[in-house]
Amino acid sequence: MAKLIIWNIMSLDGAFEGATPWDLSMHETVWGPELEALSKEQLADSTLLLFGKKTYEGMFEYWTNAANEDGEISGGMNDAPKAVVSTTLKSADWKNSRLLRSIDDVAALKRDAGDKNIFVFGSAKLTSSLREAGLIDEYRICIAPLLLGRTGGAPMFKPGDERQRLDLIKAEPIKGGGVLLFYKPSV
C-alpha cells in the first residue's frame, strides 16, 4: 500500500502562505540545492500528487506556465499523475489529472496505488480532512527561518483539528537557516 505524505514549507509561526493567497515568498528563504534535490526525489518516488481544489488550481496555473523553472521539476509536475479532491470542480484539465469526489475515494486510491508514495503539496483543508480520516502516514515540513507576525498567513494545520502526537523520523538543517522535519503519526 502507498504511503500518503504531506509536504509543505511553512514559516516558524505555522503559515504555509503569506497574508494573501499564493504568497509563497517564504519559499525563497529556503530554496536551494537541498530542496531542489528533495523535490526531484519526491517526484521520482511518487505514484500520484494529490491536491485540494484551491491548490490544484494554483499549481495548474503556475506549473503549466513555468517556462523559467527547472525543466526536470516543471516536467515532473506537469507529467506526474495527479488527483484533485473536490465536490465542485466540473473537470480536472491538467495533464494526467483525475477528479476525486470524497475522502473515501482517497482511501481507495491509497489502497490501490502500489509501493510508491502519494504526496500532498499545500492543500491545508484537504490535509485536515485526511488527518481526520487517519490516512496520513508521514509529514515532511520545511521550516523557513521567518516569523510572519502581524502580517499573518494561512495556517497549515487548522486549530479545530484533534490533537495528534508525532514521532520524529529525521531533522536536517539546510542552507539559509531552514530545517527539514520528517514525522510520522505515533501509534
Image (tube, grey):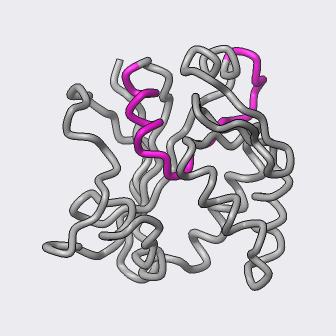
Residue 37 lies in quadrant:
bottom right
Residue 164 lies in quadrant:
top left
Q: Is residue 119 left or right of residue 78?
A: left
Q: Which residues are magenta?
A: 111-132
Q: Is residue 164 left or right of residue 48?
A: left
Above or below residue 21? Residue 56 is above
Residue 88 lies in quadrant:
top right
Label total for image: 0
- Judge by depth and name the residue closer to the eye, 58 or 67: 58
Quarter of the image where the C terminus is located: top left
Q: Position of residue 67 (x, y in %)?
A: 79, 81
For image coordinates 79% across by 51% down, the residue present is: 94
- Judge by depth and name the residue closer to the eye, 150 or 20: 20
Q: Position of residue 156 (x, y in %)?
A: 34, 50
For image coordinates 86% across by 54% down, the residue present is: 79
Q: Is residue 173 left or right of residue 79?
A: left
For image coordinates 38% across by 33% down, the residue present is: 128
For image coordinates 70% across by 59% down, the residue present is: 60
